[in-house]
Image: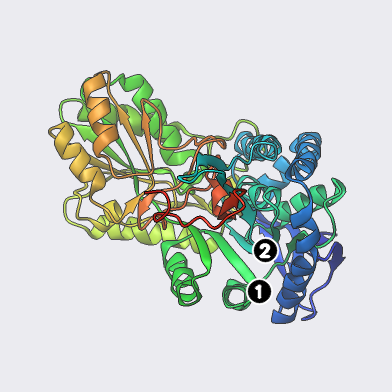
Amino acid sequence: MAEEYKNFIGGEWVKSKSNKTFENRNPADTSDLVGTFQLSSRDDVDAAVTAAQAAFPNWRDTPAPERADYMYRVANKLRERKEEIAKLMTREMGKVIAETRGDMQEGIDTADFAAGEGRRMHGQTVPSELRNKAAYVIHRPMGVWWLITPWNFPIAIPTWKTFPAITTGNTIVIKPATDTPACTAKLMEILDSAGIPKGVINYVTGSGRIVGEHLINHPDIKGISFTGSSEVGKRIAEVTGKTLKRCSLELGGKNAQIVMADANLELALDGALWGAFGTTGQRCTATSRIIVQEGVHDEFLAELVKRAKALKVGNGLDESVEMGPLVSKAQQETVASYVKIGLEEDKAELVCGGHALTDGDCAKGFFFEPTIFDKVTPDMRIAQEEIFGPVLSILTVKSLDEAIEVLNGTVYGLSSSIYTQDVNSAMRAIERIEAGITYVNGPTIGAECHLPFGGVKETGNGHREGGWTAYEIFTEMKTVYIDYSGKLQRAQIDNK
């Protein structure tokens, strides 16, 4: 019998007051029930926020190095359970086991980084313009944060948000995506077993419409961190803007890889294949467009199609499988609808894939062929809109300037890539590409946890989760002045 997962509120695993649950099934084999989860109500949300608020004063006053000690314990416990949770993750969201092990490793790395940051929460000390006066800046925790995580990285992204939030002294309520709540539950188990005080971490599952809307408007939530679609992100920004609540948004992408005529084509092919079809294209940083310089287009495309057709698609628990299923029937239908759009658009030519896989080992899941369109133009919907699946568009250009113009010609700006052996081309691309991330001779995927992560335009609202910048998101900056002169000193008056 599949496990029934409960909410984690105030240090206790509890059922929802709604007495309702929902199922989570393996997208590679829908006969495999991963578990049942609580369909939480507004009352559950209120209980979680109350618990987090009650725990905040003591946690805030816990020295940061002591909070960091918990992160060392968490990192070790994640290492101990890496294989177990990686297998659960493959069952829960479908990506192949090598990738889920990588997802777990990113969580481990993030815990190690958080442990170090607990002793490295630097402020800044500067000289005062007056005698016998000190001036410096510190960072202070804010209170209760609501963390909303997507389904494509069920451990990595929850750790990106949770570890900086609590290491800086906040308490949290986390709501994972309804497609992948099990892995986040296991993360809560690990945090609890590491001794995190009751109420610091709280976990509720359920619909974004009920849980999400209530939390956005909750007066005791001090900040919201969201990773997901631009549409939902805009809704969160709209609501939080009315109360000036802190809001960190990491949203969609339409990432492109430029392939110049002087590129190492073998390397560029490796990058394109991995960037487009890793995680079945279900990454915000996935390569959705290849912008290739004419002259190498035919050679590059022929080999890319050959390799894409050779990818082994199936259940990700099979170590030989290279691409798993889409996360849900709805996602499979979305991808199919974009293939239809591509076929109906002028000039675009389907050269690989384009169909759901429904036979043999794929009969019980939500599989789709690696799909490539050639002769795509920048104005086409398949070149403009985020698909979030294994669909790749090929666009041909004449020059570097044209390539950069095409790359920049969407509403998104998350990740980007250029393959070239000309350092001048690489540097011009770095300077002119409108994206939060640029890779040179590497695919658009592969961000590292100790560096800032995020994008420009409709990809986000300027914050960067990941690296040291995450620790700034979850804190308020306070400027401190200490006057030990023993007399009134009037800045800008008495110093002139």
Q: Which mark is residue 319?
A: none
The residue furthest front is: 487
- Say if mark 2 contacts mark 1, CB within 8 Å: yes
Disc 2 and disc 1: Cα gap in Å?
8 Å
Q: Is residue 136 above or below residue 150?
A: above
Q: Quadrant of the N terminus?
A: bottom right
The amino acid sitting under disc 2 is Gly
The amino acid sitting under disc 1 is Asp
Residue 401 can be seen in this image: yes
State the image coordinates of residue 292 (x, y, percent, origin top left): 23, 33
Q: Secondary structure at mark 1?
A: loop
Count up the numbered dots: 2
Say few, some or many: other residues with alpha carbon within 10 Å of mark 2 (under 14 / 14 to 19 / 20 or more). many
Earlier in the chain: of badge 2 and badge 1, it is 2
State the image coordinates of residue 61 (x, y, percent, origin top left): 77, 55
Q: Choose between 161 and 246: the one closer to the eye.
A: 246
Q: Residue at x 61, y 47 (%)?
A: 160
The answer to whether residue 221 is left or right of residue 348 is right
Q: Which mark is residue 220?
A: 1
Residue 28 can be seen in this image: no
The answer to whether residue 480 is left or right of residue 433 is right
**Residue 385 image-quadrant placement:** bottom left
Q: Residue at x 48, y 44 (%)?
A: 453
Q: Choose between 65 and 422: the one closer to the eye.
A: 65
State the image coordinates of residue 348 (x, y, percent, origin top left): 21, 49
What residue did someone put label 2 on? 143
